[in-house]
Amino acid sequence: MSLPAGIFINGVTGEVPDANEHYIKTIGELRGLYRDVTAFDTYLRDCGDGPAYAVAGYRQADSDIIFGTTTMQPGKIGDEYFMTRGHYHVRRDCGEVYYTQSGHGVLLLQTREGETREVTMAPGVCAFIPPDWAHRSVNTGPEPLVFAWFCQATAGHDYGDILSHGMRKLAVERADTLAIVANPGF
Ligand SMILES: [Fe+2]
């Protein structure tokens, strides 16, 4: 049986001391995500591999809801800002909520039919992700981007479509500022 609990979330570091699920994605594990392969190799050679983003989750057995945080490091590969892999949910009836606590970024969303949207990620902004919209977070600022997420425990992650095709829009730096452009490789 699930029991009520108060779970502390550090909104600056994203740390969740009571988290019982963790994973880290390193830059090196994200090969293929960025369009500029030369810039990717140069980054790894010059900066070395390290965490791109870390996820801490809190799950109670038999609960219908899970939540946690994602902490994304700042940086760029070529002109593309650091981003998450992006995913649909396996369960197409499950949406999600992202509550940005610190840092600045953009949430790229798209449907299977080709609609796209962007939602600004800034402290205090709660992003509503409707069911069956793919979503990818991008850290466009100089600081870590920390956001809390809340979703159905059985939603599941389907990374395959985005990993093989990319997303329709890219979040890139143009003249020192964020630009959302069509992905020429989609
Ligand atoms: Fe999700």
Image: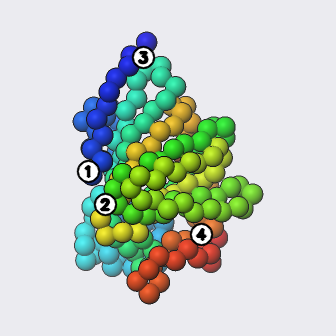
Q: Position of residue 63 (x, y in %)?
A: 47, 22
Q: Position of residue 90 (x, y in %)?
A: 61, 40
Tell which circle, 4 or 1, labels the residue nearer the N-terminal end: 1
Q: Inspect the image, locate mark 3, and give the three-letter code of the amino acid beneath it.
A: Ser
- Figure check: 154 above or below 11: above
Disc sitting over residue 151 in the figure: none
Gap in Å between the C-alphas at discs 3 and 4? 40 Å
Gap in Å between the C-alphas at discs 4 and 1? 28 Å
The residue positioned 54% from the left and 42% from the top of the image is 96
Kindly tell me whether residue 105 is visible in this rendering.
Answer: yes
The residue positioned 33% from the left and 79% from the top of the image is 42
Tell which circle, 2 or 3, labels the residue nearer the N-terminal end: 3
Q: Inspect the image, locate mark 1, and give the three-letter code of the amino acid beneath it.
A: Thr
Gap in Å between the C-alphas at discs 1 and 2? 8 Å
Residue annotated with mark 4: 169
Tell which circle, 3 or 4, labels the residue nearer the N-terminal end: 3
Disc sitting over residue 13 in the figure: 1
Q: Inspect the image, locate mark 4, and give the three-letter code of the amino acid beneath it.
A: Lys
Q: Tell us which disc is closer to us: 4 or 2.
A: 2
In the rendered image, the quadrant that contains the N terminus is top left
Residue annotated with mark 3: 2
Q: Position of residue 10 (x, y in %)?
A: 27, 44
Tell which circle, 4 or 2, labels the residue nearer the N-terminal end: 2
* Circle 3 SS class: loop
* Circle 2 SS class: loop
Residue annotated with mark 2: 144
